[in-house]
Amino acid sequence: MGFWGRTEPKIISTPYGKVRYFQLGDCVFIPRHGIKENVPPHKINHRANIFALKKLGIKHIFAINSVGSLKKEIKPGSIVVASDYISWDPPTFYEHEAKFIVPSMSLKLREVLIGILKKLKIRFGQKGIYFQTKGPRFETKAEIRLISKFADVVGMTMASEATLANELGLEYASVCSIDNYANGVEGKPLTMKEFWEYQSKMAAKIERIIEEILRTKIK
């Protein structure tokens, strides 16, 4: 939990369920997979999480998303600042009314992240298309061959959060942590050993990014 371990978790109620979060000053952190529960991606209560941030007065969301690379040139251990996404089954707050949005990533927050990554001298890509799958399983090699024609990284959480944030008028940007090559990209199957090893290696780098985000004032 890193520096969030300095404070005790709080609970906030929403129409979609209760959410546990940490708060340091004006900054709020919601562990999407739970604090100890390890909630699988297809069971994350995204609507409760995003509604809780709105209720707490948060206007800017910086997300950290673990992803697989769909391109050989996007190497594990690097970062991509997502510029757009594809999701065929997005959640919504508007299930009972005809209300529409045009979703996008926040240009302002993306520029903030790009500035932070340059300052920290961390290797990153300034843009990339995120493709969301459902999980909890990883994708087949055939699925990866298909989606790699249209996207750069693949994950199971970001697009849902970005859509809901857009619906509530919150700005959203993502640090996509490249934790593995997607299944078959290197010409071999993905192994869980490889996945966990890269996640562990990225932990210190992600903490540095979060610490810098916390120090940054957003106008």
Image (tube, rainbow, N blue to C red):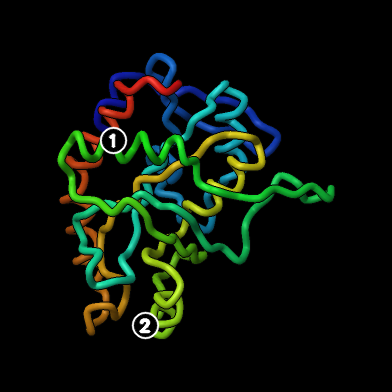
Q: Where is residue 65 drawn, in percent x and y?
A: 38, 50
Is 109 displayed left or right of 1 in the figure? right
Helix or strand or loop: what does disc 2 sit on?
A: helix
Above-or-below relation of 14 to 38: above
User: Camera-side residue: 199 or 110?
Assistant: 110
Q: Which mark is residue 132?
A: none
Amino acid type at mark 2: Lys
Residue at 41%, 85% (x, y): give it: 142
User: Label 2, on which residue?
Assistant: 141
Front label number (1 vs 2): 1
Residue at 38%, 58% (x, y): give it: 128
Amino acid type at mark 1: Gly
Q: Earlier in the sequence, mark 1 or mark 2?
A: 1
Quarter of the figure that contains the N terminus: top left
How many labels sit on residues?
A: 2
Q: Where is residue 213 drawn, in percent x and y?
A: 32, 29
Residue at 61%, 50% (x, y): give it: 103
